[in-house]
Amino acid sequence: MFARVRFFKITGYNASTGAPTLDTTAIKLYTPGAGEPEVNNRSISLEIDSSSADLEADNRKVTNEVVKGANITLSAYGVDETALSALTEFTKDDDGINRTVNTDNKKHFVLVFNGKKSNGAEYTCYLADTTIKPVLPSSEQDGDSATERSITGYASAITINGHSTLGRRCFKNEAGFLAQNVEPTATAVQALLAK
């Protein structure tokens, strides 16, 4: 299971904790009409990006692994063009068409989604510093079509309260778990990541 993807744009970082501060409006990949269910998220995969080194001291050999981040690929149906513009590095020309990659100011987000492990354990995942690779709207698909689209990005490890982290994963009955009908808020996400 993979559901309810939300992106919160990072507006800065708390000087004392290092936790991200967020824009109050969540970005949805798809906004359903009144009374329609949000049924567009297909899959998500996270591939951990790490480096390791063997350390030898005191007649012992230990492997030290450092997680740098995670490559993200998510697939969804009918991704709104407004969501793509909000998430990617393209700027619009005078006609409102995405044309130019803006590489000077990468947009950073906290990615929030619900998932379920193969054993049935439900969780809410919070990736603390995510960037999305540019995606142009294609000529074959408008923002409201049911065509599947893949979006790729990278979740970087950041330091919060002196510890390197990708974010949080909160299982059912833990603080931070969001039931299917509960929308995440910027205030709650900021507070959870700052712990």
Image: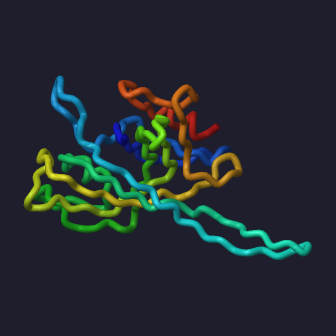
Toward the viewer: 112 or 162? 112
Q: Which residue occupies 36% across, 68% down?
A: 103
Indicate the quadrant where residue 138 lies. bottom left
Q: Position of residue 177 (x, y in %)?
A: 50, 31
In this picture, residue 81 sits left or right of residue 167 = left
Quadrant occupied by the N terminus: top left
- Is residue 155 positioned above or below 143 on the image? below
- Is residue 152 positioned above or below 60 on the image? above
In this picture, residue 149 sits left or right of residue 133 = left
Q: Position of residue 69 (x, y in %)?
A: 53, 60
Toward the viewer: 140 or 26? 140
Q: Position of residue 61 (x, y in %)?
A: 80, 73
Q: Position of residue 142 (x, y in %)?
A: 10, 52
Quadrant occupied by the C terminus: top right
Q: How many marks?
A: 0
Indicate the quadrant where residue 158 lies. bottom right
Q: How is the image coloured?
A: rainbow
